[in-house]
Image (cartoon, rainbow, N blue to C red):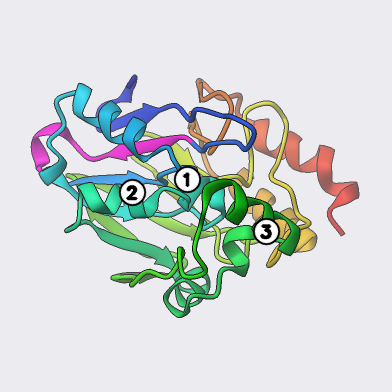
Amino acid sequence: MPRVTDGVYFIQGMDEFIPDSHMYLIGKPDSNDISIVDVGLTGKGAYKIESIKKQGVSLSSVKRIIMTHTHLDHIGCLGEIRKQIPRAELWVHRLEAEPLEQGDDRPVYGMNEFKGMCQMQYGLKKDAFQFPVERKLEDRDILEIGDMVWEVLHIPGHSMGGIALYNEAANILIPGDVVYADYAIGRFDLFGADPAALKRSLYRLAELKVEILLPGHNQIVKDLPEDYIKKTARMWEPYLR
């Protein structure tokens, strides 16, 4: 589990037939107040838990799980993780927290065909993605956690309740699947997606000073070029209508 910078650690997703999102741990090691950002695909819980333990991070120090969004490749192993860390709170943007509490799994699967395939492949029950959410996040929330400060940015488009976490002190951005490190962006054809909103979200992120980009998939980037996100937004703008 590589250390990205002080208070930020990266656990790489293990893709198979379906992608598995990266997991990030945020919080100073001696704070006893660690947050998980995204958990990953169904069946990856044991790998993620073992990766945390290998770094000497006590599971009891993990106080919360923050979801950038609730697609299956990001939330799929939440039940597995919560069995190992039952006291960790779940924090999700309100627009995806409410369906999660109600057992409405449309934001998780994105499309009915994918839902049927996954339920067969993983043996998922109808209520597999119904969870209580301890904190419903909103745009501009300030999270003072783990001796660090992160701002919540609501960045819809890839999903309706997608968020980014931004640490201004170190210019770190965790954008979920809205923007990746290879001039790619998240898909915008699933339930709750909105191409025009995704364009606005990309340009909003482009206004931030970002030196470290930690997306949901693929490579992470340190020393991000100053205009990278703006260039990516301009490349995709003709398709985001």
Q: Quadrant of residue 143?
A: bottom left
Q: Earlier in the sequence, mark 2 or mark 1?
A: 1
Residue drawn at (67%, 49%) of the image: 202
Q: Is residue 29 magenta?
A: yes
**Foreground of the two, 91 or 211:** 91
Which label is found at residue 18?
Answer: none
Q: Nearer the viewer, mark 1 or mark 3?
A: 3
- The residue that disc 2 covers is 80
Residue 149: x and y in percent read 28, 49
Residue at far right of view = 238
Instruction: Identify which amino acid the numbered label 1 is placed on.
Output: Thr
**SS category of the residue bearing label 2:** helix
Residue drawn at (31%, 45%) of the image: 36
User: Image quadrant for the C terminus?
Assistant: bottom right
- Left or right: where 23 falls relative to 19: left
Q: Is residue 36 above or below residue 183?
A: below
**Foreground of the two, 195 or 142:** 195
Instruction: Identify which amino acid the numbered label 3 is placed on.
Output: Gly
Q: Is residue 125 visible?
A: yes
State the CA–CA distance, disc 2 to disc 3. Answer: 21 Å
Residue drawn at (12%, 36%) of the image: 58
**Foreground of the two, 160 or 50:** 50
**Given contact means CB atoms under 8 Å apart, are the residues at marks 1 and 3 in contact?**
no
**Given contact means CB atoms under 8 Å apart, are the residues at marks 2 and 1 in contact?**
yes
**SS category of the residue bearing label 1:** loop
- The residue that disc 3 covers is 116
Q: Is residue 221 magenta?
A: no
State the CA–CA distance, disc 2 to disc 1. Answer: 8 Å
- The residue that disc 1 covers is 42
**Given contact means CB atoms under 8 Å apart, are the residues at marks 2 and 3 in contact?**
no
